Amino acid sequence: MSLASTLRALLPAALLLAPIPAALGAQRVVAYVTGWQTPPDIPATKLTHINYAFARIDAEGKAVLPHPGVPDHLAYLRSLKAKNPQLKILLSVGGWEAEGFSDAAASATARETFARSVVALLREHSLDGVDLDWEYPGQSVAGIKSRPEDKQNFTALLQEMRAQLGDRYLLTIASADREYFQFTEMDRLHVYLDWINVMSYDFFNSLTPTTGHHAGLYASAFAAPGDRNADASVKQHLAAGVPPQKLVLGLAFYGRGFASVTPLHDGVNQPYERFEAAHPYSELVAKFIDRDGFVRKWDAKAQAPFLWNAQTRAFITYDDPQSIAIKAEYVHKHGLGGVMFWELSQDSGGVLVDAIVKGLK
């Protein structure tokens, strides 16, 4: 065990997040932009990186573009470098329910095939790197193939990709918490990555038994002991040995709604009858926040906003400029590598991106 590993094992988790001097350079602002909702006006000067979502993996285990319109989308994103020459464009492969990763990582031959196909796409479209969004190694919760060997194979896949990408291209992944660590070698694989996009959202959704802050920075006062939050996720990554500057904190540009919620505590961490829907922040502003019985409230312990409709017993959890500013301060305080968000078209007139830029200054 290295000296750093020994010290890490002895330190309590709270000390892993001790403030770090802000001499690490400017933090990243990573925007996911989708092929099905590419915004016509992207604030290029306010971003450092764009992850284009998504490329897929075909039956031969190669990364491919999903439809003929993607090259035009990528050309548009590259054109933004005229406004911001430092902007980097990455191709994100995968996404929820995206099949093919387990097979692509299963053998040395398959890993080489996949990595070569990625390099070919990056060269063909003059891109700056690749982001892998495998949801999730070793798990079939999204209905995709998985195998126990995914744990070691994922590390081997990243090692092969790093070897083929070299220093010319960026290599990142989207990560999660809890079970994600059981089925990956986070203590080993991070050395091959430029950074990790921590999906610190969707903590409460249609699969959870209660409502809650789906992107809460901390736990609510009413949270169950096993409930998840962004701070706990970051600490889990740090405890695995990931350097703080390689962690990019995820923000949600959308909310999640729950219907027929038990009214105790204005619906926070309460049972519900039905998951209602996901709502872009722009829709929340236009139709929900302080409208038609929905009252915007603030959970000071979780550092998270939420909407509560006492008449209909509807609860909506989301991020807003206040919570995003606090998360930006958190990134500064703990020397993290920046923020990313899903996804740009869901903003409302740029107010969330502006909150990020202001908060990271």
Image (cartoon, helix red, strand yellow):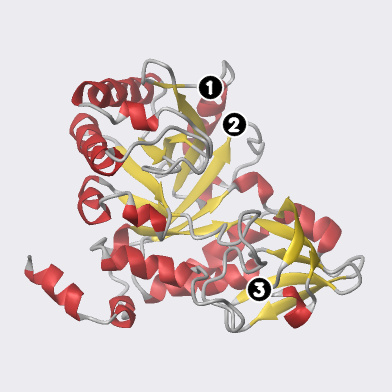
State the SS at label 1: loop
Image x and y of residue 93, in percent: 44, 33
Q: Which residue is mark 1?
A: 66
Label 3 amino acid? Asn
Mark yes or no: residue 189 visible: yes
Q: Which residue is mark 2?
A: 35
Mark 2, mark 3: which one is toward the viewer? 3
Question: Which residue is drawn at the image coordinates 55% and 61% (left, top)?
Answer: 203
Q: Nearer the viewer, residue 242 or 126?
A: 242
Image x and y of residue 81, in percent: 47, 37
Q: Bin the neighbour count of mark 3 within 10 Å (Cα to Cα): few under 14, some 14-19, many 20 and up.
A: many
Image x and y of residue 22, in percent: 32, 73
Q: Is residue 269 above or below residue 243?
A: below
Q: Bin the neighbour count of mark 1 within 10 Å (Cα to Cα): few under 14, some 14-19, many 20 and up.
A: some
Question: Which residue is drawn at the image coordinates 52% and 49% (left, top)?
Answer: 45
Q: Earlier in the sequence, mark 3 or mark 1?
A: 1
Q: Which residue is mark 3?
A: 269
Would residue 16 appear left or right of 44 to someone viewing this image?
Answer: left
User: Is the residue under label 1 in contact with that under label 2 (CB below 8 Å)?
Assistant: yes
Q: Earlier in the sequence, mark 2 or mark 3?
A: 2
Residue 291 is tagged as none
Label 1 amino acid? Pro
